[in-house]
Every structure is written in C-alpha cells, then in structure tokens.
Amino acid sequence: MRKYVIMGVQGSGKGTQAKMLAEDLDLVHISVGDIFRWNVQNHTKMGAQVRRIMASGELVGDDLAESVVRDRLTQHDWNYGFIIDGFPRNRRQAEFFLESYDIDGVIVLDLPDSEVRRRVLNRRLCGNCGMDYNLIANSPAVPGQCDMCGGELVTREDDTEEALAVRLREYHQQTESVLEIFRRKEYVFVVDARPAPEIVQEQIRKCLGLPPYNGQAADKGEGQPAAQQGSEVA
Ligand code: AMP
C-alpha cells in the first residue's frame, strides 16, 4: 500500500504526474480541485457554494475541503494506495491529514512563476468531458475541439491573469508551512517540473525508490475527466 501527496502550483503538471503514477501502480488518483469542478459543472449544492471562490483563485474553506477528502478516502476503494493532489494546501489541512493518514512520500513539483503563467494562460478544458489541453505542448488535432469527445474547449474560469496572481501568492504563502510539517518526517522530494512529463515522472520515481517508468506517453494535459474523480461526494 502506497500513499503519496503531490504538490505544486497550478500548471506544474501535478495532475499529469499523479495520473501517470496512479495508472502504473494501481493507485487511486484523488484531485480535490477536480472534485470541486465536477460539482460546479453538475450544479450541485456544493458546486454553488464553491464556484465563485474557485473562479477568484481563492481557497475553499478548510472544513469543506477536509470533508471532501474524508468522504473520498472513506470509500476505501484504494486497495493499493492513493495519490492525492491539491491537498493539503495549508497548515491546518496538513495537520488534519497527518492525524488520519501515514504518508509514504510528498512530491513537490517546482516551476518558476514565469513558466506557470505561460502554461496556465494557454490551458484549455473540454466543456463536455473535462479533459485538459495545453495550446503550447499538446493542442487538440482540431482547434477548439476535444480529441476525445468532440466537445468545445473552454478556458477554466480560474485561468485568468487575476485569479492566477491570487493563486500564486496563496501558494507561496502557504506551501512553506505545509512543507515544514511534512519535513518533520523527512519524506519531501522537490522535483524540477520544467522537463517533459516522462522525464519528470522518472525523477519522481527515483526519489520514491520505484522502478523506472513503463507506461505510455503522458496523456493530454493535466488531469482526467472530472466525472471519473470520485464524484459521489456531491
Ligand atoms: P486545483 O485544481 O488543485 O488547482 O484546485 C482548483 C481550486 O479548487 C483551487 O483554486 C481552490 O479554489 C479549490 N481547492 C482545491 N483544493 C483545495 C484545498 N485543498 N483547499 C481549499 N481549496 C481547494
């Protein structure tokens, strides 16, 4: 059983890396942001609660974020373990998390702010299935159209200059305190997120003492369709 946390600012590729690791090791990939986005897209009560907060780049309240994580993990469908991305994001969430779970490794994807801006402002999302694209690294075959389902590509509501500035500030302010808590157990690995996804994945594996990467080339974009992300939490 393996339990990992992956951290990094938006655009650092944490969704892509988490997915590659999860597929190969049969881990459950839990993206807290995807769970919230699923709720927004499907107009649930929770979606209505978080939509404006997310669009502004702010963090959703800790109580709600913690209950989403607790509910998702109590489904106990993670026989081989899990990799969680987007949580914990501050000191309180880190303490909550470590009270309940022993973690085998924390991966921090490191990316300069200038590169974050370039990636995030070129990110597009399928309005139908939720697949992520990036117009620099992996644009769709037909401009504006999802390769998977033909849906229309849209910009994430929080991928604007203004919201990104808020998120970057929040990330830099909070991350150090989360790392300080994790580092007490000495299993934090900082990985350079600038290279191609397969190279980043190799680095992650080396850090975690795992065998080399065997899977297919990285999938499009950051994540997987939000509807596959344990959406039962609605
Ligand atoms: P992400 O996809 O991880 O970038 O998350 C998108 C948005 O979801 C964030 O900007 C927050 O508004 C919200 N969110 C995701 N994870 C958390 C969390 N752990 N705590 C609070 N808000 C979160």
Image (cartoon, rainbow, N blue to C red):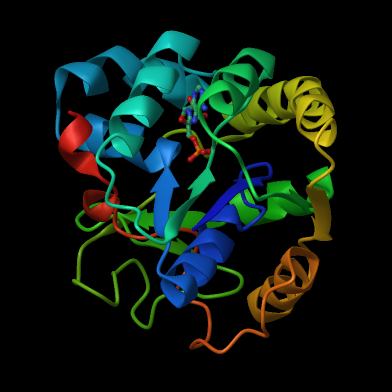
Q: Is residue 114 left or right of residue 126?
A: right
Q: Residue at x 34, y 18 (%)?
A: 50
Q: Quadrant of the C terminus?
A: top left
Q: Nearer the viewer, residue 118 or 205?
A: 205
Question: Residue at the spot x=78%, y=73% of the render?
Answer: 206
**Can the viewer see residue 61 in this picture?**
no
Q: Measured from the top left, where is residue 121 in percent x and y?
A: 59, 49
Q: Is residue 8 above or below residue 202?
A: above
Residue 15 visible at all: yes
Q: Is residue 227 above or below residue 67?
A: below
Depth order, front residue of 222/142 = 222
| Residue 189 placement (x, y as % from top left) | 81, 53
The quadrant holding residue 200 is: bottom right
Quadrant of residue 128 in the image? bottom left
The image shows residue 24 at horizontal and vertical percentages of: 47, 77
Horizontal placement of 82 versus 96: left or right?
Answer: left
Q: Image point 58% across, 64% down: which residue?
A: 17
Q: Is residue 40 left or right of residue 98?
A: left
